[in-house]
Amino acid sequence: MSNNEHYPEQPALWDESTPDSAPMRRRTRPRPEATPPPQPTAAPDSPRHPGGERLWTAADVAAYLGVPVKTVYAWRSRGRGPKGFRIGKHLRWRVAAVFEWSLDQERNQ
């Protein structure tokens, strides 16, 4: 019994392909281009201090420094890294503090 009896449009495995029946090809998605890490951007509802400066999250700090978010948390637990603070249960960093810390790292090397 061949597959053609139940599914006439689908050839059996042992059937030879004919010139008019092109082999089915698998659709593939194009590979994404290499993209740079996301840069911190100001969202309309992001927390700001009275001077209007946006406060950074751990993800923002990690993106700026090019390290994983876990590294930012590890630095904080060890007393290293840029000085952050809590707003309720949320950690935030001042942009100037992160810049200054990164410049200190560069100077001390």
Image (cartoon, rainbow, N blue to C red):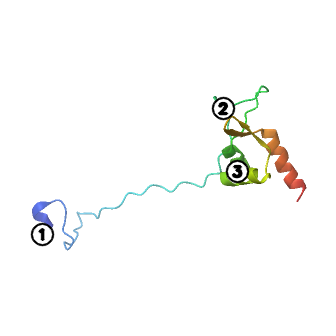
Q: Which residue is mark 1?
A: 2
- In this figure, which residue is indicated by the disc labeled 2? 46
Question: Can I make out residue 73 in this image?
Answer: yes
The location of residue 3, given as percent across then percent down, is 14, 66
The disc at residue 73 is 3
Q: Quadrant of the N terminus?
A: bottom left
Query: Given the image, on which type of amino acid does mark 3 rest?
Result: Tyr
Q: Amino acid at mark 2?
A: Ser
Q: Give the vertical position of 99 relative to 74 (above or below).
A: above
Q: Earlier in the sequence, mark 1 or mark 3?
A: 1
Quadrant, the C terminus:
bottom right
Callout 1: few (<14), some (14-19), or many (20+) C-alpha neighbours within 10 Å? Answer: few
Q: CA distance from mark 2 to mark 3?
A: 21 Å
Q: Position of residue 5 (x, y in %)?
A: 9, 63
User: Residue 9, relative to residue 61: is it above or below?
Assistant: below
Give the residue drawn at x 90%, y 54%.
Answer: 107
Q: At which x and y percent is residue 65?
A: 74, 51
Position of residue 62 in the picture relative to residue 22 (left or right): right
50 or 17: which is nearer to us? 50
User: Taking 70 as reference, is 1 above or below it?
Assistant: below
Residue 45 position by quadrant: top right
